[in-house]
Image (cartoon, rainbow, N blue to C red):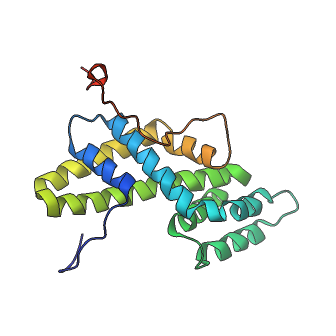
Amino acid sequence: MSDGPHKSLPLRPGYQRVAAWAYKPAFSVSQIGEAAESALLRDVTIEVVPTIKSLQAIVDGQDLLSLASSVNDQLERLRVDPAVDTLAANAVEGAQMALREGYGGLVALEKGLASALAERLAAGGRAMEEHYLVKAGPGACQQMRRRMNETITYMTNNGTFDRMAKAILGDRSVNVARTPTVHDGVDQGVPL
């Protein structure tokens, strides 16, 4: 929430769609999740793709001869690098936690990416709340919070964040929603 007379930054276009769909009860949680998946993938393209190869090289280079401390040191240097965007830095931090939990290689990176995506959507949900608080009042803000929490829970339970992480790392066996499905025909209305 803002503290003072400062104006909120505008939401990115993908998150504007998520907010609009979350605000309207006609959209199901799965539809909101599809829009959120699309918005998150756009963030990945902007913030993670430039560093994904170096991140994969560090994590995938871990074998029996690599010292876990050197891998962790390399990840820490990458995480604090000012050229690394926030979402990528969060993925690095998540990978570090997964390595400490005993996961190794690309599995640790998948866990880190999935965690970073869930955190980004939660942060985006808070930004959406703030916009709707200003735009439509406290009742809309509470509705937005409830719907976004339902969406995050739905996406977590369905493995959406894990599936997205696998797709980001190049697994072609999983599908991701690059654009949300728009139901604009008479026969494609709200499910009854």
The answer to whether any part of residue 22 appears in the image is: yes
Q: Residue 44: x percent and y percent?
A: 54, 56
**Whether residue 153 can be seen here:** no
* Residue 85 in the image, given as x and y percentages of width and height: 54, 70
Residue 191 position in % (x across, y down): 27, 23
Q: Residue furthest front?
A: 185
Which residue is found at the position 40% from the left and 47% from the top? 36
Q: Is residue 96 left or right of residue 142?
A: right
Asked where in the image residue 47 lies, by quadrant, the reply is bottom right
Q: Is residue 105 above or below residue 66?
A: above
Farthest residue to the right: give it. 65
Q: Quadrant of the C terminus?
A: top left
Give the left or right position of residue 93, taking residue 56 as reference: left
Identified at 72% across, 58% down, the residue is 56
| Nearer the observer, 59 or 22 | 22
Eyeballing the image, is 113 above or below 187? Answer: below
Q: Residue at x 76, y 65 (%)?
A: 68
Given residues 191 and 89, the one toward you in this image is 191
- State which quadrant residue 55 falls in: bottom right
Image height of 172 relative to 108, above or below:
above
Residue 76 lies left or right of residue 39; in this view the side is: right
Q: Nearer the viewer, residue 55 or 27?
A: 27
